[in-house]
Image (spheres, rainbow, N blue to C red):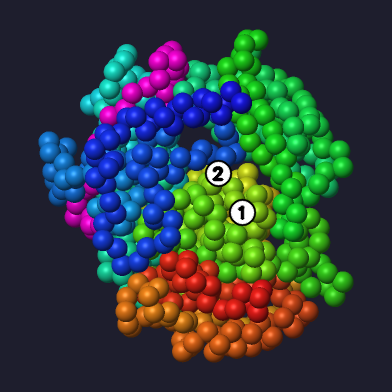
Amino acid sequence: MNRVLILIVLVIIAGSCQNKPEVAAWKPAEGLLMTRWAEEVNPASVLPEYPRPQMIRDEWLNLNGLWDYAIIPLSGEKPKKFDGKILVPFCPESSLSGVGKSVGPENRLWYHRTFELPGFWSGSQILLNFGASDWETKVWVNGTEVGTHKGGYDAFTLNITGALKKKGHQELVVAVWDPVDEGTQPRGKQVMKPEGIWYTSVTGIWQTVWLEPVAKDHIRSVSIITDIDYNLVTITADLSMEEFKGCALEALISTDDQLIAEEFSELNNVVLSISDPIYWTPEYPFLYDFILVLVKDGVRTDSIEGYFGMRKISLGKDEKGFTRMMLNNDFVFQFGPLDQGWWPDGLYTAPTDEALKYDIEVTKQLGFNMARKHVKAEPDRWYYWCDKLGLLVWQDMPSGDKYIGGNDPDIIRTEESENQYRLELSEMIHERYNHPSIVVWVPFNEGWGQFKTGEIVEFIRDLDNTRLINPTSGWTDRNVGDIRDIHAYPGPAMPEPKANRAIVLGEFGGLGLPLEGHTWQEKDNWGYRSYNNQDELVSAYSALIRELMPMVGKGLSAAVYTQTTDVEIEVNGLMTYDRAVIKMDFNKLK
């Protein structure tokens, strides 16, 4: 109850920092298509949900809302006058930002706002958190540069304590440059000139920005490893201090507010035994709650809350001798859509948390148990809903750099390109390590940016040996990793069974149907194959599934249908881009 009251007060404080006339004057920029959730976007309370569900602290301050913005040439300095207001965390290219303008690699995007800290935070270290900002982000507080970050999909935290004034308004300035498709950085499907399967660029802040107070000695992050074979869970803390001397961790695990395990450790990790564990599955996504307390010299300095799921993903043999993807030591056929994670009004950013949740709910309701998150990494709350609702996730690394064909050797990246790829890949894995829903990492898609394939597989294995690795979804197989993956449009098809790797159909289908009033443009929409009406689409889809199902008995472990929704001029979705229509009869599709 105390935490709820504190959160309510902090939301009120955050809202009061907004200028009320500006909030009343805000409206979305003219857009080609909007979702029904756009009407629920409130500039005084934008995406107010706690952004880090697996590491919750009681006190925080949401900085989403109306900021000043300016788009100026790269050579320009901090603007003295701004162009207008932008609704953070929506990118300026989106309608919901209120801007609706392209930035491009020749310009820099500047942000400005002020904030005040609650008085009871006095004496704390103040952390400034960015969920994600694409791509190179520089930050100043009260005129002092506090940090630079390169990466479009990973969170970053800056300790701004030394730059803060003792009281009153604090000034925050952010500058972002994005090379889009002129650079080699991971960028997914963003391009300056969208067409076909390529979409509008996203520049700048696109996830929640927020503040939190911590003690000097605090928990920076946690990693959770569950072992269902021995009924153990290991919680390891990354701490702000260099030495653990004088520190201890206490971990408490509960279900339905009933304590089921408790351990105290003088190391930076705690191992707990779970009696008669309930496994996490798509059918029954059971989650355990935990509290982790840091004690320094007998004084409690930090406490976080989170959750985890007891589950195992591995390879194993079935009764016919096929190598299978096993969930909790049993074969479960994984079937779900390719999920791009784009929104017509917010682009990379869902209008609301309910909208973010909706795609997962529909995916489940249609009978799927998996989604492949395609060349994009989502906000932490998307994975939270997958954990809560029970959806297996294959997580792609956002692609970038050059392409190769099916018979070409791996590309040779520059040192800068390779280092940036490895950095962003490691951050993606580190930040999402604890989500039970994620079961597969996919570093390369259809030869895009593919380099040193065997080395990258081992690089991922060193970072996370608890999940499977699908090294090359689509083609350019190098006989490494846990999975052999092919794409077939419309398909279906399957690879030849492998002795030590599971075989999957990483993409198929792509059946297109543009529905008038729900498309990005009125004509010239694109699909792998297009149909005239919903009955034709149902018939074609049913034919594909009738061909697919016998392949399971021949060794196929998983299949990915293209795709969850239409995206811009691509009309291959199970739903329209605005999420207003499920294109096929719901019951037949399920």
Is 333 situated left or right of 565 in this image?
right
Q: Vertically, is 575 above or below 461?
A: below
Residue type at numbered disc 1: Cys
Check disc 1: other Cα within 10 Å, few if <14, some if 14-19, many if 20+.
Answer: many
Rendering coords of residue 55 (x, y %): 58, 35
Q: Quadrant of residue 431?
A: top right
What residue is shown at x 55% (from left), y 44% (from top)? 430
Rendering coords of residue 360 (x, y %): 58, 59
How far apart marks 1 and 2 lie (CA) works out to 18 Å
**Residue that badge 1 annotates:** 386
What residue is shown at x 46% (from left), y 23% (from top)? 213
**Residue that badge 2 annotates:** 430
Rendering coords of residue 471 (x, y %): 57, 64
Q: Vertically, is 204 above or below 104?
A: above
Image quadrant holding the N terminus, namely top right
1 vs 2, front mark: 1
Quick one: SS at disc 1? Answer: helix
Q: Which residues are magenta?
A: 100-127
Q: Vertically, is 186 above or below 543?
A: above
Residue type at numbered disc 2: His
Rendering coords of residue 499 (x, y %): 75, 72
Image quadrant holding the C terminus, namely bottom right
What residue is shown at x 46% (from left), y 40% (from top)? 48
Q: Earlier in the sequence, mark 1 or mark 2?
A: 1
Is 14 situated left or right of 513 in this image?
left
What residue is shown at x 45% (from left), y 50% (from top)? 352
Q: Quadrant of residue 298?
A: top right
Frontmost residue, 114 versus 299: 114
Is 27 situated left or right of 545 in this image?
left
**Does the magenta run of residues contain 128?**
no
Q: Vertically, is 582 above or below 384?
A: below
Q: Is residue 504 visible?
A: no
